[in-house]
Amino acid sequence: MVHAQDEVTPLQLEITLYSDGRANVFYLTEVDPTKVRVNVSLFGDHISSLVIRDEDGVPLGSTETATGIRVDTIGASELSIRYITSSLTMKAGPIWTLNVTTPIESKITLPAGATIIDISDIPSGLGITDGKQYVELQPGELSVYYIIGLPTISEEAQDVIDEAGTYVARKEAEGYILSDAQSLLTEAQSLFSEERYIEAKISAEQAISTTQSIIVHADKAEDELSRAENAVDLARENGRTDGLSIVEASLSTAQRFYDEGNYIEAETLARQVFLDAQVLKAPSSVGFYLGVLILVAGAGVAAFYLWKKSQIEEPPVPKPQQEESRTTEIDLDKIFWEHEDLRLEDKEVIKFLAESNGEAFATEIRNRFEIPRSSAWRLIRRLVNAGIMEEKKIGNQSLVRINEKYRK
């Protein structure tokens, strides 16, 4: 800016920055009272809200020029010029930059919550007014770099802890067992209370990464369990039952590991069960034929016994139709009233159980709704934890049933 062309003498310059990048400029100058109008260079362009007054506070008129304004001073000795411009600042990422060339020492006030991260010259003064930081700089080409709302390490740690807590809670609600992640989250909260913010942030980040790792292993374990179960079922259907009971026991153990949240152990054991089920063989032929003869003989004796009994006993009196169709009635209204936050899939499973006399095997639920083992397991966990259902192991099967308090 070429201030030599100005017909004024600068006295005071203050620039107040706003959080949206606009700048409020106050410029006080001395003028020759014998002149009728003077030229004044302004700082920046795209001027708005321009107000010019003389030393008595009387508003003065002006017209725009190529470098600023021409003011009708009409004998004034001082001009106070105030206006707003958005051309003095620019933003790159989170960093704002003020660039301005000043003819005199200037006072630059930053937005509330702003922090200076770099400056073009050594300040002649620093301070805080009305909760806002200001810097005083000598005349010349000036650049001030600042960030608005720079978070502190304590705020960063708290944000990560909150994020971890929300994430872990959401995944636990889906049925995952996240004991290790919960321990790290508790540790992070404890470290934060001790004002060990960096360590607290690290522990919270580890809680998130541990949760993600557990979920990966849980999903892998679910896939391996499904493969192992299908292999065992296929061996049973094909008569390859020599050693099947041992493989079934291992499958039951793998399922228990999964239910307890030991996903890596469940994954490893289920993979071994799958391999073992692949190599199962049928019993020896002698034992097989002997078993067949025993079954045939037993069937003949049973048929003869039933025939004799039908000859000497009166035919049974059929039960009334009402008695035959009698089932356990489930109070669905009570369940849905007490648990308004149930998901749609939860309600569908509850209705299915109600139609199945209040109970069903977990495999039946998976087959009915065509959902993976892990999804079914997490759904069952939610309903058990909510007190709607209870679970009972029968062999290597899981039987779930509506809680007694919801049965009529």
Image (cartoon, rainbow, N blue to C red):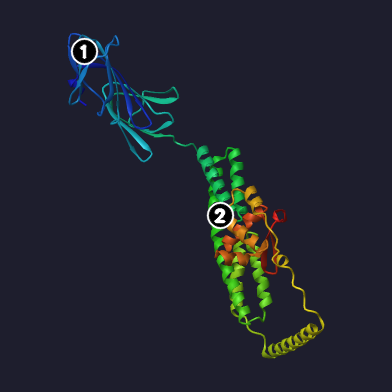
Closer to the chain start, of discs 2 and 1, is 1
Relative horizontal placement of residue 302, taking residue 225 as reference (left or right): right
Q: Between 41 and 346, which is closer to the camera in this rendering?
A: 346
- For the point 70% across and 69% down, the residue is 395
Residue annotated with mark 2? 344
Residue 107 at x, y = what percent? 35, 22
Q: Which sits in the foreground, 52 or 9?
A: 52
Q: Which residue is mark 1?
A: 73
| Residue 140 in the figure: left or right of residue 332 | left
Mark 1 is on which residue type?
Thr
Provide residue 263's location: percent of width, then percent of height. 60, 62
Q: Tell whether 56 sits left or right of 231.
A: left
Image quadrant for the N terminus? Answer: top left
Percent of width and height locating residue 257: 65, 63
Residue 175 showing in the rendered view: no
| Rendered image quadrant of residue 125 | top left
Label ID, residue 200: none
Quadrant of residue 131 within the rendered picture: top left
Q: Is residue 315 above or below residue 4?
A: below
In the rendered structure, which amino acid carries the disc numbered 2?
Leu
Image coords of residue 189 (percent x, y):
60, 42
Residue visible at 57% across and 68% down in the picture: 224
Q: Residue at x 54, y 51 (%)?
A: 208
Residue 337 versus residue 361 in the image, above or below = above
In this view, the mark in front (2 or 1)? 2
The residue lying furthest to the right in this view is 312
> Quick one: SS at disc 2?
helix
Q: Is residue 140 visible?
A: yes
110 relative position to 258: left or right: left
